[in-house]
Amino acid sequence: MAGAALDTTSSSPATPTEPADRSRPADPAAASGQTGRAEQGGFWALVRRHRTFTAILTVGVLLRIVTMLGYRPAMWFNDSFDYLHVAMSPYPHAIRPDGYAFFLFLLRPFHSFALVVALQHLMGVIIAIIIYALLRTRFTLPAWVACLAAAPVLLDAYQIQLEHLVLSDVPFTFLVILVIAALMWYQNPSWKVGAAVGLLLGLASLTRSVGLPVLFAVVVYMLARRVRWRVIAATVALCALPLAAYAVWFHSYYGKFAMTESNGVFLYARVYKFADCNKIQPPTEEIPLCVQADHKLPFSQDGIWNRRSPLHRVPAPRFTEMQNRIAGDFAKRAILAQPGDYFKVVAADFFRVFQWNRTVFPDRDTYEEYEFGTHAAALPDWRMSQDKTADQEAAAYERGRASTQIAEPFAGVIRTYQDVFYLRGSILGVILLVGLGGMIPLWRRFGGAALLPWTTAIGLLLAPAATAEFDYRYILPATPLACLAAALAITPKIRSWYPNRFRQRRGVVSAQGAPGGAPEAPESAAEPDMEPAATAK
């Protein structure tokens, strides 16, 4: 994806226009024609100035069109049908928040899953445009740097496939990117910007519960930049508003102010493989969750979904308050009693992200749901309610056939593309290291502007490993943030910092300043991309 030669001439400024000749009488007709030609030429001038990015963008759009033609109307994941069930008859779901279900509900009058995934493809394209525009306009980086940062979102085959799934990850990523871009654009945000950021964070947290840690990263970033306390308060308050409303709705159904009844259950799955009751010494009600090492199922997620899971021994229905409480308490005891074992499984899943090849994990069925396949499976007939199965609800939403239909040769084109063109995990690791390297020279300012996208990317990769289990879909939302942080390491100040430090160690840099006679800027000087905001009086 990054191998193509990139044109850097688009960074040159546009030619200034000639001053108007005021001695000539005004001609409304001529002026109108000139304006029309200027507006018409404005678009093509924009394309010429950014022709490398336009070429990459065009390829990305064409790939998405091929995908929509090859796999109609959409592709499906196991979780898709829970979201769809809520969209058909809204209620607070016990396992996951309903943000994405609301998205499906709003689109239900159109009766088109093709529209759902088309909007998700559009979100992917807009994410790339935001990254490019932010780096070129706000940080004035070269065109080739901005193109490289935006290319993975546009060209990664697994990103395109994720956009084509009826699944929450792409809308979540879109909301997070809007938050990060807004905070990086405004050095000194107003309370209105803070309120908008908070509202977007609230919606992101309703879309995926991992959005709440993003709020923590945002607040830390604001404190590091000394943002006014009114802005921080507006951010937190507007984030809490949709979450509080949802919690009230949840309480009306379950008698408890919460977002889900699954956090403890998923944490139990995290400790399931290593939990040793001889070390934990759980109370009597948690003993049914104990399993001998030689009787444990092969994957952590088996602790939730497998019919032989110990959770079925708890005298309570699945994902209820009692089961969630018992499973969560057992998991916390296991982590405290076996911190070393917990660290090992978290580290193993975290570093699995950076493997060169995508291996079959956690099982063949899940792995294949992220692949453009040669055969379309029928929609499941799981019973979602007393009178509706999953396939029936999908047909009712679509008002027609909702199962995936594979159309050649388009499907074959995107399948072949997926075999080659995707971001390897090892390359993502290098991208994160580049971003970290760019933060080191700005350590006195907490890493500069790259702090927020870099820490958010790490958090999005670490959270699943710490609370549930690794899954390939959790890598993709972190990728644009990692690319954004790495691009900021290409600023002239950061590039010059490393050779200067190397020369200083070798005794090459003179006492007067940096090589070339120009005095080296002191480390305490404010960076153009990280000037502290005014503090509140």
Image (cartoon, rainbow, N blue to C red):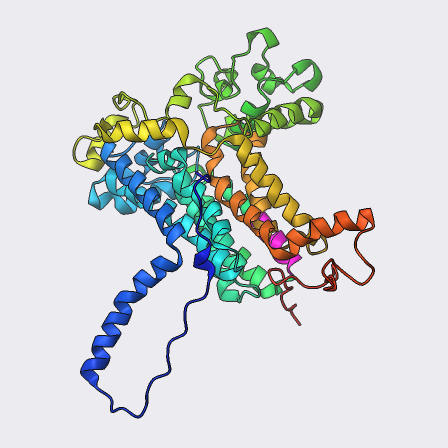
User: Along the horizontal axis of the image, is 386 left or right of 499?
Assistant: left
Residue drawn at (42%, 67%), measured in percent from left and top?
14
Question: Taking 207 as reference, is 352 left or right?
Answer: right
Specify whether residue 217 is painted magenta. yes
User: Split into 4 quadrants, where in the image is the N terminus?
Assistant: top left
Asked whether residue 414 appears in the rendered view, the answer is yes
**Residue 230: quarter of image:** bottom right
Q: Horizontal and vertical percent for residue 191?
A: 52, 66
Q: Which of 66 and 313 is in front in this view?
A: 66
Name the side, left or right, on which 35 lies relative to 514: left
Q: Give the range drawn in magenta.
A: 215-225
Q: Position of residue 366 (x, y in %)?
A: 41, 22
Tally of numbered discs: 0
Q: Residue at x 65, y 45 (%)?
A: 437
| Residue 200 visible in the shown view | no
- In the orientation shown, which residue stands out farthest toward the top? 294
Residue for point 38% across, 34% down: 157
Point out residue 322 in the picture as x, y percentages from the top left corner.
Answer: 51, 28
- Place of residue 232 in the rendered image (x, y in percent of width and height, measured from the top left): 58, 60
Q: Residue at x 58, y 17 (%)?
A: 273
Residue 407 drawn above or below residue 447: above
Foreground of the two, 280 or 224:
224
- Give the prevailing secondary structure in the magenta stretch: helix
Quadrant in the picture for residue 24: bottom left
Task: Please check the rendered image and state whether residue 404 is part of the magenta-colored stretch, yes or no.
Answer: no
Residue 507 drawn above or below residue 459: below
